[in-house]
């Protein structure tokens, strides 16, 4: 497609999403979801006053991307910077993001009254996942006085939301220390104390083993693993091994607590995932409390494309379930 064909799609998205940015332009939101809105190779996100253009094309077209960036910059004249992330770029810098315009990308955004630190070119994504916004809101509303383990924490936004909701303690664990350092930046933005002992830059499997060996229990455990990861300590496979991962953390959850399970495997249908959860719940010690939807504006309107697999009863391939936990007395 050339720019003249793309522009009407962009203008529809601009018209429907203008209200997502507040008067100070501190929020983050998905402006254009090309998979659902007629251009599968393009995603446009806004973080504060920074546009992030994700180009997923097999054969990237930098000239077209620049045209798109200029059009959005003109339409949203409060934007201060733009970044192009080329998924199939030839260099790591291209994949992580290069400036399209402006000088300094935003380093923080605000969601539900909570600040989150950003590093928009630290990784191929943007260091903050927009699809879990409703879960962060749920954590803010339900974690007062609770202890929380956030496994596969990445940059720790779910744990930060729990602290913002009054959690008594949050343990954040991720293999990458750099990601956890960004979580600490979020703590500082909100005035939360940083306890180094609550951050584990280590593989998931030995962390869980250590917590079990010291008989630690949490009121809430969150598992949001990557689609696939393999280390010398173990393998994460969201398509085939959901049950094993969930069973790993069950002994760490206190009676009456919550297990929050997130699965973003595109090729795993919602029906298959629900069957896995129901199978795990068959012994009566786990039960599905509720499903958390992905924000509707993240999915986009109007919806032209169809998902690879049907996510129902979820509304998106990012499938979020909250389970109630009982322990044997």
Image: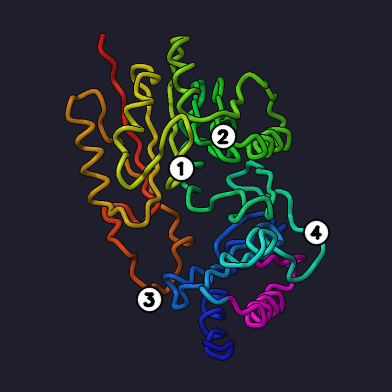
| Element marked by disc 2 | loop
Q: Which mark is residue 175?
A: 2
Q: Which residue is mark 1?
A: 229
Q: Which mark is residue 172?
A: none
Q: Residue at x 54, y 50 (%)?
A: 129
Q: Which residue is mark 4?
A: 104
Which numbered disc, 1 or 4, marks the residue closer to the eye? 1
**Crowdedness of circle 3 by 10 Å Cα count: few (<14), some, many (20+)?**
few
| Element marked by disc 1 | strand
Is there a contact, CB below 8 Å, between mark 3 and mark 2?
no
Q: Residue at x 34, y 56 (%)?
A: 315
The x, y position of residue 154, in whole percent, is 56, 40
Q: Is residue 327 above or below residue 16?
A: above
Magenta residues, as a range?
A: 60-84
Q: Which mark is residue 304?
A: 3
Which numbered disc, 2 or 4, marks the residue closer to the eye? 2
**Crowdedness of circle 1 by 10 Å Cα count: few (<14), some, many (20+)?**
few
* Mark 1 to mark 4 CA distance (whole Å): 33 Å
Instruction: Return the residue nearer the eye: 273 or 18.
Output: 273
């Amino acid at each position: 497609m050339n720019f003249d064909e793309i522009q009407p799609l962009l203008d529809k998205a601009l018209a429907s999403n203008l209200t997502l940015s507040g008067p100070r332009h501190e929020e983050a939101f998905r402006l254009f979801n090309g998979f659902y809105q007629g251009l599968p190779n393009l995603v446009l996100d806004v973080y504060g006053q920074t546009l992030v253009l994700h180009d997923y094309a097999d054969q990237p077209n930098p000239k077209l991307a620049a045209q798109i960036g200029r059009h959005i910059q003109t339409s949203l004249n409060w934007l201060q910077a733009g970044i192009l992330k080329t998924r199939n770029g030839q260099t790591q810098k291209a994949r992580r993001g290069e400036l399209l315009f402006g000088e300094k990308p935003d380093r923080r955004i605000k969601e539900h009254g909570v600040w989150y630190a950003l590093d928009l070119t630290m990784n191929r994504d943007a260091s903050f996942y927009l699809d879990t916004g409703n879960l962060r809101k749920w954590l803010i509303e339900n974690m007062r006085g609770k202890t929380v383990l956030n496994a596969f924490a990445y940059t720790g936004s779910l744990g930060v939301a729990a602290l913002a909701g009054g959690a008594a303690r949050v343990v954040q664990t991720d293999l990458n220390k750099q990601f956890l350092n960004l979580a600490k930046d979020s703590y500082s933005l909100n005035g939360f104390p940083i306890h180094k002992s609550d951050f584990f830059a280590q593989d998931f499997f030995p962390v869980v083993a250590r917590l079990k060996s010291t008989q630690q229990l949490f009121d809430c455990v969150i598992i949001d693993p990557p689609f696939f990861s393999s280390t010398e300590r173990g393998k994460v496979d969201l398509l085939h091994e959901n049950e094993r991962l969930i069973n790993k953390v069950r002994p760490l959850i206190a009676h009456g607590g919550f297990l929050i399970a997130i699965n973003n495997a595109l090729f795993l249908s919602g029906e298959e995932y629900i069957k896995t959860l129901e199978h795990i719940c068959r012994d009566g010690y786990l039960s599905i409390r509720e499903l958390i939807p992905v924000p509707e504006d993240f999915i986009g309107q109007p919806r032209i494309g169809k998902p690879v697999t049907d996510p129902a009863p979820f509304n998106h391939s990012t499938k979020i379930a909250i389970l109630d936990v009982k322990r044997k007395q």
